[in-house]
């Protein structure tokens, strides 16, 4: 094989590898199905309810028996809303955003994993914060309801070697 053919082949392989890497990294940008979008909207709705201390809206998106693991503890039913309302009374405001959703729907069940990028604002200012979160949902009467949620605060700075890019 001539040097010119080898160089062309090597350049083609390199370009193909780069193309695959770009496609794989942008795979999370894919369009969501209608069910997947409804799951994301349901999670956004619980954040909206919490931001507004709106128990009616909270109950509209959670299933009976709902619980969440947060801040190293289990919160059943409205207990998380009680905690958030107390934080609001202390002058703290929270911003929560569903980013990079990875949604799976199987019949009338779904699970979602996402990065919640937001922040906490108090009298001293706003601190950017991130959480790795997941939720399990069931479709009841044609409406998605959150059964379980889990959140883990993202460390301030993760070593590059520990970050997965799927």
Image (spheres, helix red, strand yellow):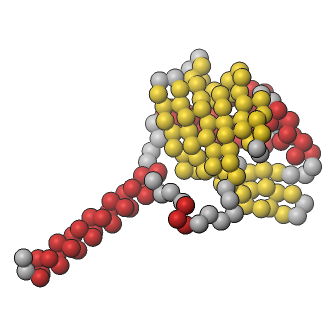
8 displayed left or right of 69? left
- Residue at 45% across, 36% down: 33
Please state the total of marks drawn on the protein image. Answer: 0
Rendered view: 68 above or below 109: below
94 displayed left or right of 105? right
Q: Is residue 63 visible?
A: yes
- Residue at 55% across, 34% down: 111
Q: Quadrant of residue 142?
A: top right
Q: Which quadrant does the N terminus fall into?
A: bottom left
Rendered view: 40 above or below 1: above
Q: Where is residue 81? Give x, y as percent.
A: 81, 36
Residue furthest to the bottom in view is 3
Q: Where is residue 10? Give x, y as percent.
A: 21, 73
Q: Where is residue 58? Give x, y as percent.
A: 75, 31
- Residue at 74% across, 51% down: 95
- Residue at 90% across, 60% down: 123
Q: Where is residue 56? Give x, y as percent.
A: 78, 27
In this view of the protein, which residue sits in the foreground, 142 or 150?
150
Rendered view: 6 above or below 144: below
81 displayed left or right of 69? right
Residue furthest to the left in view is 1
In this view of the protein, which residue sits in the foreground, 20 or 125?
20
Q: Quadrant of residue 18?
A: bottom left
Residue furthest to the top in view is 141
In this view of the protein, which residue sits in the foreground, 151 or 57?
151
Q: Is residue 60 visible?
A: no
17 displayed left or right of 109? left
């Amino acid at each position: 094989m001539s040097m010119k053919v080898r160089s062309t082949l090597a350049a083609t392989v390199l370009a193909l590898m780069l193309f695959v890497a770009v496609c794989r990294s942008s795979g999370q940008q894919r369009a969501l199905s209608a069910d997947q979008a409804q799951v994301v909207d349901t999670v956004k709705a619980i954040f909206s309810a919490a931001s507004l201390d709106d128990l009616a809206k909270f109950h509209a998106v959670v299933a009976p028996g709902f619980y969440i693991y947060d801040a190293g503890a289990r919160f059943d039913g409205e207990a998380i809303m009680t905690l958030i309302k107390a934080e609001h009374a202390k002058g703290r405001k929270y911003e929560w955003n569903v980013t990079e959703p990875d949604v799976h729907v199987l019949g009338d069940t779904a699970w979602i994993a996402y990065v919640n990028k937001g922040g906490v604002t108090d009298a001293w200012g706003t601190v950017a914060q991130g959480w790795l979160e997941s939720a399990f949902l069931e479709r009841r009467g044609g409406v998605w309801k959150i059964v379980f949620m889990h959140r883990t605060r993202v460390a301030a700075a993760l070593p590059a070697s520990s970050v997965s890019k799927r």
